[in-house]
């Protein structure tokens, strides 16, 4: 009897052990994913072909990622086509514009899972910033996990050695000193310019006007009335400055024909055509790196200086928001069943963990990245800096554009890379100056006219501003373009926003 | 396909034969017709069903059947917008290109026709066809390089005029640049049909007129041009059908903030609102309006052709 009992007990124990084991072993699961591809010129190594990164992710989570790459330039079109075929939608995909018509209409039509009440159960997702989640919400509901981007990225970077040649050795400390610097750089030589501009004028006009004190997109006056930013006096001040600089030979007259892909050409050269750019400051530390790598410039002192967070004439410090704290979002489509949803969200949660972030941003240690003796992350093994390119090649095929899946809502947890003077300064800027970044007060307001006509209307306004800067039209004609904006739908947008603002 | 469609028409005029005997009589011609008919059904007629989204608020995820019916909302929306600008830009650019690019291949074909050396003529023709096969993207890139401020013509113009000429930005020059690109790219290719028509001209007429003492210009005016007149009219009617088709690739590539006031045409608008901003319903409605105007143009021009005593399109 005792024997039988012990046998039964032993059997029970074995069974329960097996039960625990099976609960711990992660269930295999394939998730289909659609991502924009920035490396389409390189072949992609799939899991079946032995991609070590996908293999490591599979070992850690039991998830087999089945990724459909779409060239970034065609991603917008493919988004619509993909959503038009609900039977074959990927389960997880990137939506690039959280406030685009396609995102709003698809979310309302029920293409994506509503995650508003679900993310609280996933610690990493729940750690995301409330304000940014609000920024991407539609009708107060959350349909995706945002892909975090640094907030205080925008500013001015310029060649400080050239500024010294022009007699300005100190960094400008306010808006009027900044203007002085610009005119000094403009006057440095006959065939060189101050501000490097291209077809994409958004950042130049935005940074200049916001630095001068204008609101971003829309402003709210003392009486609580919403008005378009371009009708702010400080906006005009910023625009007038650009116009004067253009007249003084400080901007390439042909800037509007330069594609944004060739934007770097004027500055990445031994004899740069332009000495300053109003853009993301990380381009500034990359430019310095380029000079060091390609022209052998010394790292210390750097020839590039970063400038941001300087007060305008009234002492107000403002930074142009390069983004809404996010670059698009990751959505879970209705191709995922209700039973599978928690597992998919767990996977997204894991992607935000240190392990997950490292896997998709850096790859596998010893294959895609190496931690050197100094404790920093490098893209090549210690002592092999000379043939770093072979490792880059390998990363392009195995790592590809996996970082597009990166959300990092709980901050960047990947192993850090060694700093440079400018990179450290940039990182410090992000910490110190996030408080000065201004937002669009109407970002989350709903207006059908804005959804339908907003892009066209904004384009017309930008065109008029470019013509004003280029001295093709005068102030009256610019004002006339603003009037057209009001008549063609702007007034309707303002009315919609005002109603939403008053209801708040 | 053309001959297949025409042949059965003849006996019917004589009266009598039914469709069944028709088909059995020219069985192979009808079999050869099948791929063409299928092409038109699959790629031209069936997609027309999609026009229905012009009357809906189409959401891709909800599909054609699931989207809300909004009737003529999008048409009203369009007429509330800056529609006249798009229409004027389209018509001006289109008529400019008809007036300037339509005669170009005729003139070139007549010139080629006068070349005596057959070898030289063949070589010239081949070289003239080459630009047609160059992608418009490349043509625009070449234009940018040549006409830019530091380009060959850009610098030359600056020296001659004494000031910089903004070929790529000036709205007044924009249409000329577009028409110029089209003439460069398509004139050679366009000669093919006229050269074919010229080979049909009875050479005896030339000989007879030479005996009568007609000079070259008179022969051209009184024999060659009347001989290819119906071809010219036919091509013109076809061209009028596409009068509102300005295409969008070339215009989008050439457009920038300075010249957008003249580069925004209906096609560009449809592309931007439909593909770029994914407003499918709105874009379909505008596209449909454009097609209606095009049909009116074809029918109208054809009527005029008949009035002038030409065969026209049908």
Image: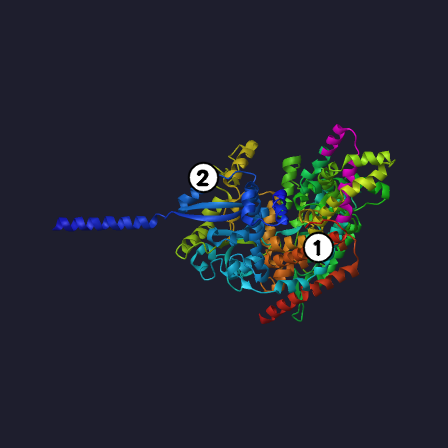
Looking at the picture, do discs 1 and 2 lie on one chain?
no
- From the top left corner, tell me how far across and down residue A238 is, in percent: 73, 57
Category of crowding for the residue at label 1, using alpha-carbon neighbours closer than 10 angstroms: few (below 14), some (14–19), many (at least 20): many
Marking on residue A165:
none
* Rendered location of residue A246, percent (x, y): 77, 50
Q: Is residue B107 magenta?
A: yes
Q: Nearer the viewer, residue A53 or A279?
A: A53
Q: Quadrant of the N terminus of chain B?
A: top right
Whether residue A174 can be seen here: no
- Mark nearest the camera among 1 and 2 is 1
3D distance between C-alphas at marks 1 and 2: 62 Å
Residue extending furthest toward the right? B213
Query: CB atoms at circles 1 and 2 under 8 Å apart?
Result: no
In the image, residue A277 sits, relative to residue A339, either above or below, namely above
In the image, residue A445 lies in the stretch drawn in magenta: no
- Give the structural element (helix, strand or loop) at label 2: helix
Q: Which mark is residue A52?
A: 2
**Observer-nearest of A193 and A117:** A117
| Extreme residue in the left direction | A1
Q: In the image, is residue A321 above or below residue B151?
A: below
Q: Residues within 10 Å of mark 2 (few under 14, many from 20)?
A: some
Does the image show residue B32?
A: yes
Q: Provide the residue span drawn in magenta.
A: B97-125
Percent x, y of residue A318: 66, 58
For label 1, the residue is B297
Number of marks present in the image shown: 2
Secondary structure mostly taken by the magenta-highlighted segment of the chain: helix
Residue under the image location 84 percent in, 45 percent down: B163
Q: Nearer the viewer, residue A145 or A240?
A: A145
Name the chain under label 1: B
């Amino acid at each position: 009897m005792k024997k039988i009992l012990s046998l039964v007990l032993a059997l029970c124990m074995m069974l329960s052990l097996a039960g625990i084991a099976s609960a711990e072993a992660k269930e295999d699961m394939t998730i289909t994913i659609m991502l924009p591809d920035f490396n389409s010129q390189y072949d992609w190594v799939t899991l079946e072909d032995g991609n070590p990164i996908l293999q490591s992710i599979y070992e850690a989570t039991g998830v087999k990622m089945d990724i459909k790459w779409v060239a970034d330039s065609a991603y917008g079109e493919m988004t619509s086509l993909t959503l038009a075929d609900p039977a074959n939608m990927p389960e997880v995909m990137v939506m690039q514009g959280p406030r685009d018509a396609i995102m709003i209409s698809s979310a309302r039509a029920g293409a994506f899972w509503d995650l508003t009440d679900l993310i609280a159960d996933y610690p990493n997702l729940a750690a995301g910033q409330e304000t940014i989640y609000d920024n991407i919400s539609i009708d107060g509901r959350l349909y995706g996990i945002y892909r975090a981007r640094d907030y205080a990225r925008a500013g001015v970077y310029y060649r400080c050695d050239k500024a010294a040649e022009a007699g300005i050795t100190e960094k400008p400390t306010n808006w009027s000193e900044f203007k002085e610097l610009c005119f000094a750089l403009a006057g440095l030589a006959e065939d060189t310019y101050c501000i490097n501009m291209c077809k994409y004028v958004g950042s130049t006009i935005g940074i200049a006007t916001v630095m001068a004190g204008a609101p971003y997109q829309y402003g709210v006056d003392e009486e609580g009335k919403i008005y378009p930013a371009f009708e702010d006096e400080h906006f005009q001040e910023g625009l007038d400055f650009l116009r004067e600089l253009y007249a003084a030979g400080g901007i390439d007259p042909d800037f509007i024909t330069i594609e944004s892909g060739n934007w770097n050409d004027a500055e990445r050269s031994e004899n740069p055509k332009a000495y300053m750019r109003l853009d993301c400051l990380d381009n500034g530390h990359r430019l310095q790196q380029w000079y060091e790598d390609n022209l052998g410039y010394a790292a210390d002192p750097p020839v590039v200086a970063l400038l941001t967070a300087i007060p305008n004439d009234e002492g107000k410090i403002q930074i142009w928001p390069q983004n809404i704290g996010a670059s698009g979002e990751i959505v879970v489509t209705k191709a995922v069943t209700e039973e599978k949803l928690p597992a998919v969200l767990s996977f997204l949660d894991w992607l935000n963990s240190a392990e997950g972030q490292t896997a998709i941003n850096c790859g596998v240690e010893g294959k895609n990245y190496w931690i050197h003796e100094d404790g920093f992350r490098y893209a090549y093994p210690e002592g092999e800096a000379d043939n770093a390119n072979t490792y880059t090649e390998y990363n392009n095929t195995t790592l590809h554009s996996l970082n597009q899946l990166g959300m990092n809502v709980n901050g960047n947890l990947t192993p850090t890379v060694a700093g440079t003077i400018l990179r450290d300064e940039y990182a410090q800027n992000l910490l110190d100056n996030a408080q000065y970044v201004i937002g669009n007060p109407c970002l989350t307001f709903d207006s059908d006219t804005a959804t339908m006509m907003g892009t066209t209307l904004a384009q017309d306004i930008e065109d008029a501003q470019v013509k004003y800067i280029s001295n093709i039209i005068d102030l009256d004609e610019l004002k006339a373009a603003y009037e057209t904006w009001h008549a063609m739908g702007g007034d309707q947008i303002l009315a919609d926003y005002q109603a939403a603002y008053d209801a708040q | 396909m053309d001959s297949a469609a025409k042949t059965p028409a003849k006996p019917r005029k004589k009266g009598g034969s039914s469709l069944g005997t028709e088909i059995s009589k020219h069985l192979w011609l009808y079999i050869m017709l099948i791929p063409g008919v299928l092409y038109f059904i699959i790629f031209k007629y069936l997609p027309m069903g999609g026009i229905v989204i012009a009357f809906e608020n189409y959401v891709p995820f909800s599909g054609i059947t699931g989207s809300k019916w909004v009737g003529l909302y999008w048409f009203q929306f369009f007429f509330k917008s800056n529609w006249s600008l798009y229409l004027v830009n389209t018509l001006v650019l289109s008529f400019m290109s008809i007036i300037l690019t339509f005669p170009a291949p005729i003139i070139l074909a007549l010139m080629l026709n006068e070349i005596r050396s057959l070898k030289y003529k063949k070589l010239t023709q081949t070289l003239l066809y080459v630009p047609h096969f160059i992608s418009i993207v490349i043509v625009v890139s070449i234009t940018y390089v040549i006409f830019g401020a530091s380009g060959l013509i850009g610098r030359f113009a600056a020296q001659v005029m004494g000031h910089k000429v903004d070929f790529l930005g000036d709205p007044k020059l924009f249409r000329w640049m577009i028409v110029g690109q089209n003439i460069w790219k398509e004139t050679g290719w366009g000669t093919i049909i006229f050269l074919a028509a010229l080979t049909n001209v009875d050479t005896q007429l030339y000989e007879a007129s030479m005996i009568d003492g007609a000079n070259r210009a008179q022969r051209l005016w009184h024999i060659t041009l009347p001989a290819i007149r119906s071809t010219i009219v036919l091509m013109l009617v076809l061209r009028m059908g596409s009068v509102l088709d300005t295409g969008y690739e070339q215009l989008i590539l050439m457009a920038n903030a300075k010249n957008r006031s003249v580069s925004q045409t209906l096609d560009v608008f449809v592309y931007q609102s439909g593909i770029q901003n994914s407003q499918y319903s709105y874009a379909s409605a505008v596209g449909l309006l454009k097609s209606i105007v095009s049909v009116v143009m074809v029918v109208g021009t054809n009527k005029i052709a008949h009035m002038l005593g030409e065969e026209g399109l049908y």
